[in-house]
Image (cartoon, grey):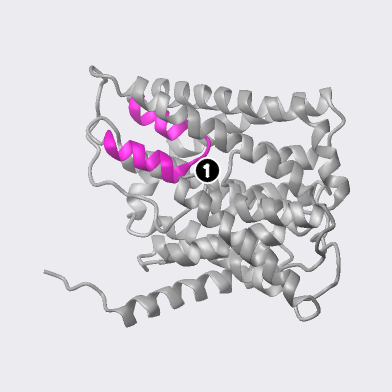
Amino acid sequence: MPQAPSSRQKLVRIAQSLLIGAIGGFLFNAAKFPAGWLAGSMVFAAAAALAGRPIQVPSALARLCSVVLGIAIGGVVTPETLRGMMTWPLSIAMVAISVAAATLATFAYLTRVHGWNTVTAIFASVPGGLAQVMALAAEERRNCDLRGVAIVQTLRVMILTVVVPAALSLTGRAGAVRPPASPITVAEAPVAFAILIGTASALALFLLRLGFRGGVFFGPLAVSAALHGGAFIDVTMPSWLATAAMVGLGTLSGGRFTGMPFRLLLGYLGAALGAFAVSLVVTAAIAIAVTLAAPLPVADVIVAYAPGAVDAMMILALALNLDPVFVGAHHLTRVFVVSLGLPILAHYFSAPGGNGTKSGRPILPKGDGLDD
């Protein structure tokens, strides 16, 4: 019987994982790839995991990275951006419709084209909430192919994180990284920084205890946005710390392929890519309709409607010089829709009499992801 790794071995494995992610982020950033620190760390971690090297990011560190990035992204909010929230009711309402439409279209594709059973297809079709999806799917493992669900959902997150910034950059719709609202440093305002960190961390912990999906990210973002948008404080998160947090979350996302044989990935690749394409087409069509009906920036709408991980999409908003309040409000709406609708769908589609498939050993996400 193999012995459990020692604490020292775990620390070495974590350090190696983060080093792999940091190298990838550095190279992508050096190549001027948009959101390079996030995309590069994710790609390198995924490649290492598929090559057989275990990638490990502990949940505590993942949550810390989420708090840091939430504060950093909220720090670019100004009073003007907060006043603009009241001008988006149509766009925010359409997010709920896009979630439902993308889910139904992807479900139809997986059941009719690839012959997946209804339980597996519905869990693989929901655009978001990977951790929540896998938890509910594990309860239905008799009728659900957990490997297929994990692969479809994880590839969707990775493709969007890499492709969206590249596409926006090539079309000239991405700007430089948005600087903080004020050049005030932590050393110049230590008390204000302590208040910012304390209140943001307290709300993150509270939402985590409540079981709110993505609370460790959205809580600090909301606190930081309110304090900066209300002009109560000017100090922001140091850029080097935000970059380190991007590497941590990117490595976490790429590490979800740990323990997954490459042959297995290839076997599900057609269904995963097809499901991604169907979801993207449906979501893009609704986003285009929104831009035609309301005078909204195209790039902001694209990232706001993209069915990717909340943390990744918010980082893209920061890296691509987009409006974080606009993007955050839309993804928060998606989180609520998925959180409320997924248990209902799971109960409905897992009713007795469903046609099951053999699921094999489940492959669950590594670490503690957010809404991805």
Position of residue 47 measured from the top left corner of the image (x, y, whole percent): 46, 62
Position of residue 294 measured from the top left corner of the image (x, y, whole percent): 84, 26
Residue labelled with disc 1: 156
The correct choice, above or below, for 62 with respect to 206 in the image is below
User: Can residue 116 be seen?
Assistant: no
Asked if residue 122 is among those painted magenta in the image, a careful observer would answer: yes
Does residue 135 appear left or right of residue 251 in this picture? left
Q: Residue at x 62, y 23 (%)?
A: 97
- Which image quarter holds the N terminus? bottom left
Q: Looking at this view, is 87 or 128 the one in front?
A: 87
Q: Looking at this view, is 85 or 29 the one in front?
A: 85
Q: Which residues are magenta?
A: 118-140
Does residue 348 appear left or right of residue 86 in this picture? left
Query: Residue 74 sits in which quadrant?
Result: bottom right
Amino acid type shown at disc 1: Arg
SS majority, magenta: helix
Q: Looking at this view, is 93 or 120 the one in front?
A: 93
The correct choice, above or below, for 180 with respect to 81 in the image is below
Indicate the secondary structure of the residue bearing disc 1: helix
